Image (cartoon, helix red, strand yellow):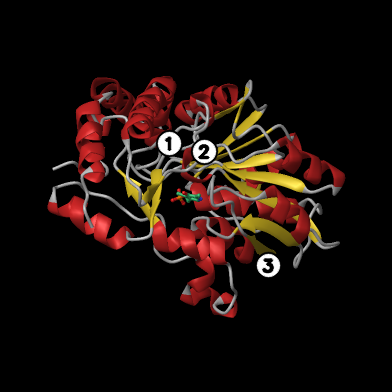
Amino acid sequence: MIKFLDLKATTALHGAEIQQAVSDVVQSGWYLQGEANRQFEEHYARFVGTRHCVGVANGLDALIWIYRAYLELGLMHPGDEVIVPANTYIASILALTENGLTPVLVEPRLDTLELDDAQVAAAITPRTRSVLLVHLYGRCAYTERLGELCREHHLLLVEDNAQAHGCRYGALRTGSLGHASAHSFYPGKNLGALGDGGAVTTDDEALAECIRALANYGSRKKYVFKYRGRNSRLDEIQAAVLDVKLRHLDADNAHRQAVANYYYDHLRHPLVRLPERLADAQNVYHIFPVLCSRRDELQAYLAEHDVQTLIHYPIPPHKQECYKEWNDLSLPVTEQIHSQELSLPISSVLTLDDAARVAELINNWKP
Ligand SMILES: *Cc1c(COP(=O)(O)O)cnc(C)c1O
């Protein structure tokens, strides 16, 4: 059986160091807001290339806090429009509606599956205040044109880097390309904890301070409450685990890139379309998506041959029950992606032999 995701093996890859880090926290008797958080935040900020990193409870909260802080700081106002890719994971959009902001769903490009900057330009109105750029599937979605559009129209550029830890854009990393970035450390992500975790990275000190307070009941000083916050902290065990895994992140991503390169070099099937290939550094392959007009048949065929695949994602946000008001929107590129996308196995522990087996099966598929 070739598993889509093998978290047990992923953890075992750095098992001894992780065990030691967990044990150190257990022994320390200090479980929240301590040295492990301080260390990880410092290391992750340095890795990403920002002045600040604030650990929070999960990736959705990281997104929610960024926009909540912009509201608290008076840089955004309820009802402001935020441009967001229509084909993203629902969390990106939940963070906007949670804050009373207006998501403007914009179509991606079919060749890259990422936000289309021509469509962004067309969607900007006088009420647009921000672009939420999602590096979907682990692929850098930033473009020079998008950066220019944000500068020209004074838009806050926020990155959703939940799927692209360690990804590069030239000499920079994703997570440092805009005004602020949200990161998720959900166990299956490239940098994954042993439970929930998240972080915000930014160069903006006021924003970082505000988020640190919001995620701690709204308090910067014990028993003094500046904001109506929540409890949304990263715990010490997760921070210690993440600090270990961060040291191996580039090597783990390089392994994913080797698997992806194998797929790109060997997958040849008239019905299976691969996204445009990027230079290695610009894609950390959280997911390896392919498009296939007979996706469900391909998935069933691979399952029969003991290969697990997933779909990211079967139902686009605008077709979800929680966003009934958008159910009649027509977003043909997004809908095509959701009906044709299939995610092949890829991870830091998938062997090249496994990748070869997957590629061979697909190449021999006779629908
Ligand atoms: C995983 C993910 C999130 C949410 O992160 P959680 O830690 O699960 O809350 C947000 N955006 C994207 C694109 C994601 O993939």
Q: Nearer the observer, disc 3 or disc 1?
A: 1
Residue 360 falls in which quadrant of the image? top left
In this picture, residue 6 sits left or right of residue 71: left
Mark 1 and mark 3 in contact (Cβ < 8 Å)? no
The residue closer to the viewer here, 145 or 156, is 145
At horizontal 25% and vertical 61% (from top left) the residue drawn is: 297
In 3D space, how far apart are the residues under numbered discs 3 and 1 (Cα atoms)? 33 Å
Q: Is residue 217 visible from the viewing direction of this image?
A: no
Q: Amino acid at mark 1?
A: Tyr
Q: Nearer the observer, disc 2 or disc 3?
A: 2
Residue 18 falls in which quadrant of the image? top left
Q: Which residue in the structure is indicated by mark 1?
A: 285
In this picture, residue 366 sits left or right of residue 168: left
In this picture, residue 75 sits left or right of residue 307: right
The residue closer to the viewer here, 273 or 320, is 273
In 3D space, how far apart are the residues under numbered discs 2 and 3 (Cα atoms)? 29 Å
At horizontal 67% and vertical 34% (from top left) the residue drawn is: 177
Up/down of 157 relative to 28, above or below: below
Q: Which residue in the structure is indicated by mark 2?
A: 139
Q: Amino acid at mark 2?
A: Arg
Query: Mark 3 falls on what kind of element?
Result: loop
At horizontal 43% and vertical 66% (from top left) the residue drawn is: 315
Query: Mark 1 falls on what kind of element?
Result: loop
Mark 2 and mark 1 in contact (Cβ < 8 Å)? yes
Q: Amino acid at mark 3?
A: Gly
In this picture, residue 21 sits left or right of residue 58: left
Q: Which mark is residue 152?
A: none
Q: Is residue 317 visible from the viewing direction of this image?
A: yes
N-term-proximal mark, 1 vs 2: 2
Q: Which residue in the structure is indicated by mark 3?
A: 100
